[in-house]
Amino acid sequence: MASAQFPDEQSDTGEFERQDDAFRDWVTPDGSSGYPAVAGRYHLYVSWACPWAHRTIIVRHLKQLEKLIGMTVVDPIRDDLGWAFREGPGHTLDPINRFNFLSEAYFATDPHYHGRVTVPVLWDKEKKRIVNNSDDDLMRIFNSAFDELGAANLDLYPKEHRLEIDQLNALIYDTVNNGVYKAGFATSQKAYEAAVLPLFATLDMLEERLANDRFLFGDTPLETDWRLFVTLVRFDAVYHGHFKCNLRRIIDYQNLFGYLRDLYQQPGIAQTVNFDHIKRHYYYTHDDINPTRIVPLGPIQDLGAPVDRREL
């Protein structure tokens, strides 16, 4: 059997089994959680390359939290020492703690931590520890916890859609968001095929759904749309070739590709997509999948091409 990208997260039969998020504390408006919503208290550590971190970057932008929560971007090249803070195009040193590696934040929070170090991370500058490293939680925290401090009047998780949002989130996470990783990190043919077929079954279902609706829940993008977007925007550039998810490309789906461009063209979203970081991270870091570390030039795709789905 081939070597695994993350041996501790690989089954004996070749399936990738993602680790659980380690830190799940919550920021609340009243501080009852021990972490009150306070301007300037929290700092977000992210990678432009990582789809999980990308979700939190998008919600931070949509909710206009830039003045309330700072953000630092790590180097997209992750080596044996993990995510690093270095000066370079689109990434910087750590201005908050002067950490050299993100792992220092994990060990400062739990000296006995032994799991994989991941982004995003929400850091509490007062308690000097990680509050949360779950993108699911952070999307919800950013959506509502800071509303009384001047966040944008936008609800990405409205009550009337919550049940269906949770159901669709679960399906899309298992078969699409994490599905591409289950395919790409599979170390057996059986495990690979068991991931790829449900992935494209869900994409086919979404293609049909988006024939009649501009976004997944109507005329406004909600939480699920942005959870899906971060995978779609990486799909043709990375997952189609690098992860062998190659039954079809997103550009081959009329409705999904129009939907992708529609989301990409929402105000400020294109600025959160850094294809240089995305491609260098995947193709250079995953040297067990791409031993030459050659980063492809393509694909040529125009996500800014005019699209009008408003009539749906």
Image (tube, rainbow, N blue to C red):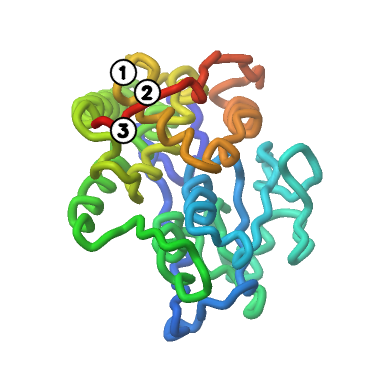
Q: What residue type is labelled 3?
A: Arg
How much space separates mark 2 and mark 3, taking CA atoms?
Answer: 15 Å
Disc 2 is placed on an element classified as helix
Q: The C terminus appears in which quarter of the rendering?
A: top left
Of tags 2 and 3, which is closer to the observer? 3
Residue 161 in the image, given as x and y percentages of width and height: 21, 55
Closer to the chain start, of discs 2 and 3, is 2
How much space separates mark 3 and mark 1, taking CA atoms?
Answer: 15 Å
Residue 278 in the image, given as x and y percentages of width and height: 59, 32
Q: Name the residue under label 3.
A: 310
The furthest residue to the front: 311
Q: How many marks?
A: 3
**Answer yes or no: do the residues labelled 2 and 1 have beta carbons within 8 Å?**
yes
Q: Which amino acid does label 1 sit on?
A: Gln
**Answer yes or no: do the residues labelled 3 and 1 have beta carbons within 8 Å?**
no
Q: Residue at x 61, y 45 (%)?
A: 47
**Circle on res. 254:** 1
Q: What residue type is labelled 2?
A: Phe
How much space separates mark 2 and mark 1, taking CA atoms?
Answer: 6 Å
- Looking at the image, residue 77 sits to the left or right of residue 194; the answer is right
Q: Name the residue under label 2.
A: 257
Whether residue 194 appears in this view of the structure is no
Quadrant assignment, res 107: bottom right
Relative to 169, does residue 200 appear above or below in the rendering? above
Of tags 3 and 1, which is closer to the observer? 3
Disc 3 is placed on an element classified as loop
